[in-house]
Image: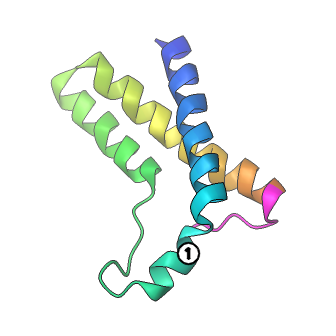
């Protein structure tokens, strides 16, 4: 189970980095966009999936949820800290 979480975390982080390179900072997008004035980090979605897993005991939800949560934490507190010298959280 933890191997799948690790692999998915690296996949989600790779997609996050590519998105950042392609689109730039999401903070700029959300400041300009009046329809979506707030951001939902994929870590929040991950925590929601883990909570739902506590109710239904479905391993795939736990794997996806933990992968999303760890990827978001890794992205904000390691990658962005090294890349742009700030965490951009929240």
Placement of 12 over or under 79, stated as above or below:
above
Q: How is the image coloured?
A: rainbow
Residue at 46%, 11% in the rendered image: 1
What is the number of callouts on the image?
1
The x, y position of residue 36, in whole percent, is 33, 77
Question: Is residue 20 rendered to the left or right of residue 68?
Answer: right
Residue 58 appears in the figure: yes
Viewer-nearest residue: 70 or 24: 24
Placement of 33 over or under 17, stated as above or below:
below
Viewer-nearest residue: 90 or 21: 21
Residue 90 appears in the figure: no
Q: Residue furthest front?
A: 22
Q: Which residues are magenta?
A: 83-90
Q: Residue furthest left?
A: 56
The quadrant in which residue 10 appears is top right
Is residue 31 part of the magenta span, yes or no? no
Placement of 22 over or under 57, stated as above or below:
below
Residue at 56%, 21% in the rendered image: 7
The x, y position of residue 37, in whole percent, is 37, 81
Is residue 84 part of the magenta span, yes or no? yes
Viewer-nearest residue: 48 or 19: 19
The x, y position of residue 90, in whole percent, is 54, 69
> Neighbour class for label 1 at 10 Å: few (<14), some, many (≥20)?
some
The x, y position of residue 34, in whole percent, is 35, 88
**Residue position for label 1:** 27
Magenta: predominant secondary structure element? loop
The quadrant in which residue 41 appears is bottom left
């Amino acid at each position: 189970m933890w191997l799948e979480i690790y692999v998915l975390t690296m996949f989600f982080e790779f997609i996050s980095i590519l998105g950042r390179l392609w689109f730039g900072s999401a903070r700029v997008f959300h400041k300009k966009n009046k329809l979506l004035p707030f951001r939902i980090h994929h870590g929040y979605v991950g925590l929601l999936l883990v909570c739902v897993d506590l109710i239904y005991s479905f391993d795939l939800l736990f794997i996806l949820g933990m992968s999303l949560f760890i990827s978001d934490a890794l992205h904000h507190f390691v990658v962005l800290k090294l890349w742009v010298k700030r965490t951009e959280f929240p």
